[in-house]
Image: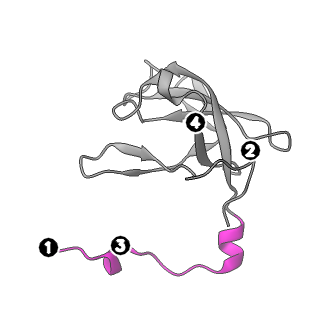
Amino acid sequence: MHVTAKDVVSAEITWDDFMRVELRVGRVLAVEPFPEARKPAYKLQVDFGPEIGIRKSSAQITVLYRAEDLVGRLVVAVVNFPRKQIGPFMSECLVTGFHNADGHVALCIPEQDVPLGSRLL
């Protein structure tokens, strides 16, 4: 079966629906291995600026990114999801990305430097 983009687009949402999702820019401060995760992952600490502060996240990005290369990078994350327990780790935001052709996650990142905590609009 051939799947088109039209087939995978879900129901339309309103502007108000979109505005309820807080997609914000943060800077990765620290990266640790997460050996307890079911799939290979890192534990990230991400700074979203003074309004939001530092949040923790688990990210399955070990194939495309080395831990030492992530520190200092900007990422886009959802900051208004409820906290989620992932094994022994409490995730406080969802770092966003896209699966590449091989199924590995490539981070969603701003092309230019923007202030921490900036909201995607």
Disc 1 marks which residue? 1
Distance of label 1 from label 4 (alpha carbons): 39 Å
Residue type, numbered disc 4: Arg
Relative image position of residue 77 (x, y in whole percent): 61, 48
The image position of residue 87, as x and y in percent, is 52, 26
Residue 67 to residue 58: above or below? above
Q: Which residue is mark 4?
A: 73
Q: Marks 3 and 2, how far apart in space?
A: 32 Å
In this rendering, the label closer to the viewer, 3 or 4: 4
The one nearer the camera, 14 or 118, is 118
In this rendering, position of residue 76 left or right of residue 118 = left
Q: State if disc 4 and disc 1 touch (CB < 8 Å).
A: no
Residue 8 highlighted magenta (yes or no): yes
Q: Earlier in the sequence, mark 3 or mark 4?
A: 3
Kind of residue sitting beneath label 2: Leu
Query: Would you name the residue on which mark 3 appears?
Result: 8
- Kind of residue at disc 1: Met
Q: Kindly check if marks 3 and 2 are in contact, taking CB atoms under 8 A apart as contact.
A: no
Image spot of residue 58 (x, y percent) = 53, 33
Name which of mark 1 and mark 2 comes first in the sequence: 1
Few, some or many residues within 10 Å of mark 4 (<14, 14–19, 20+): some
Q: Are the two marked residues, 3 and 4, in contact with CB atoms closer than 8 angstroms? A: no
Q: Which residues are magenta?
A: 1-20
Residue 14 is situated, as x and y percent measured from the top left of the image, at 64, 81
Q: Which mark is residue 44?
A: none
Query: Which of labels 1 and 2 is toward the front?
Result: 2
Circle 2 sits on which residue?
116
